[in-house]
Image (cartoon, rainbow, N blue to C red):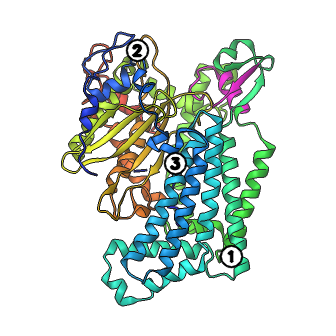
Amino acid sequence: MLLAAGARYARRLCGRGAAAALQGRTGRSCARDVSTSWSPVGAAFNVKPQSHLWNLLGERRGLFGVPELSTPEGFQVAQEEALKKTEWLVERACSTPPGPQTVLIFDELSDCLCRVADLADFVKIGHPDPAFREAAQEACRSIGTMVEKLNTNVELYQSLQRLLGDKKLMESLDAETRRVAELFMFDFEISGIHLDEEKRRRAVDLNVKILDLSNAFLMRTNFPNKIRKSLLPEHIQHHFARDGSHLIIDGLHAEASDDLVREAAYKIFLYPNADQLKCLEELLSSRDLLAKLVGYSTFSHRALQGTIAQTPETVMQFLEKLSEKLSERTRKDFKMMQGMKTKLNPQNSKLMPWDPPYYSGVIRAERYNIEPSLYCPFLSLGACMEGLNVLFNKLLGITLYAEQTFKGEVWCNDIRKLAVVHESEGLLGYIYCDFFQRANKPQQDCHFTIRGGRLKEDGSYQLPVVVLMLNLPHASRDFPTLLTPGMMENLFHEMGHAMHSMLGRTRYQHVTGTRCPTDFAEVPSILMEYFSNDYRVVSQFAKHYQTGQACCRSVLPSMTLWMPSCLT
């Protein structure tokens, strides 16, 4: 599709003096006893300034520095401008003789739409203001509808076909340009460009319907469930947020030590929802209709074409082989968890669906003598961010700088903005760190592309911008945000996606950063997990949030042994 794949999960140069923004901002003014030995990046995440006047004064800018987005109504302006430019670019693409310029125009067309759709895709779920979320949702739908119409535009398709049909001309193009041209053609083909006019309209309608259903289903999965307080035993009510006479169940509470808390959270949060089930069934049915309409036996075959896996059959072979290899280890793990529950709760010893995360953690803690109070003080968020900074510098020649944001640029005052600077290339892009819990924030850790990188016609480079979303606890008056090893692993994983976005620097935004096969997009992030699990790496940055003392070697191996998903 012209709208680059993976906008949701989903990632993203001119040497500007990024360090200048740090002058006078050591972050040592704080309300608790925290070490003042942190680097600027560590301090930005560990030390809470006494006021945010710098974010309240001065010129107002829109979200991510986009002037139009200082109000929700700005999304209407942004989408209208994008659609107007789209019309001009389509005319240009259709009238330009086939050549490398054709691919550049197609990529600019993709970028024009993605710059609104990607940003809106984040805002519709990440912004705390309902008005912004609704405006962003409408922008997503408007741009998405245009994308599907363009993917079945015969005249636009023919302009690209003239280029790909000229063998001599194609051979004269560089490999990257050829590949991008082929990807654009692939998007036309899976969207039904070969169909007659009536079926093409049907394909567009189905795609728009799927877009609406997918959004509705995903949004509802993030909604908490409410239950009257009187329906739960009084001694567990304090584990859940309150709303008048109701309790809010916004997650599984998988690490709660009380079996009844985990059971209540599991049953209430995952309680069957008839509307969700109907939405899912309609979504699956629409996907099936679309796949068969455009010539595929199933939606899976359509979705996997162009990925590393290629076919559903390959995926099933992999899963079956993996299941076979892990089955014996899994049986041993569940036997151990059953034994632990019998030991701790002999009156109610049957292992239930809400038990494995908790009891597997108990077993690891016992086996490796892990006590959270021993290692958590060494894993403050600031320490982990310093660790990432050191790691990126040694591996990639990259330094992270904490930058000041302007009024209106961010959607919450606890957002941190990082400039990513290479030792020779200069500024690579920006990462907005939305790390902390808040009401109605999706309970998921993920990476969003806000703007992809690309080489512009004037020779300058469009800097990538991404958001990393986590759900970490806020700092308290007494200590900064302290991470568990699992939280640290998630942080490293998402920063792997961010670095992929920063370093995957291409001429065309259609293939920049994580705009690649989804299965490959996980490779850099999983690699970063290995660094977070290696005590040789962790020992470089794990230090006490108060004293700055390095974590002793006897604790570090236990910390990193916590991480494996299997017990054995």
Q: Is tag 2's residue or tag 3's residue first in the polypeptide sequence?
A: 2
Q: Position of residue 122 (x, y in %)?
A: 54, 45
Crowd band around label 2 with a 10 angstrom C-alpha radius: few (<14), some (14–19), many (20+): few
Residue receiving disc 1: 200
* Quadrant (top left/top right/bottom left/bottom right) for the C terminus: top left
* Residue 287 part of the magenta-drawn span: no
Dot in front, 2 or 1: 2
Task: Name the amino acid type tagged 1.
Answer: Arg
Secondary structure category for the residue under label 3: helix
Spatial CA distance of label 2 from label 1 is: 58 Å
| Amino acid type of the residue tagged 2 in the rendering | Gln
Q: Residue at x 48, y 27 (%)?
A: 413
Q: Is residue 40 left or right of residue 78?
A: left
Q: Are marks 2 and 1 in contact (CB under 8 Å)?
A: no
- Judged from this view, the residue extending furthest toward the left is 424
Camera-nearest residue between 526 and 214: 214
The boundaries of the magenta stretch are 246-268
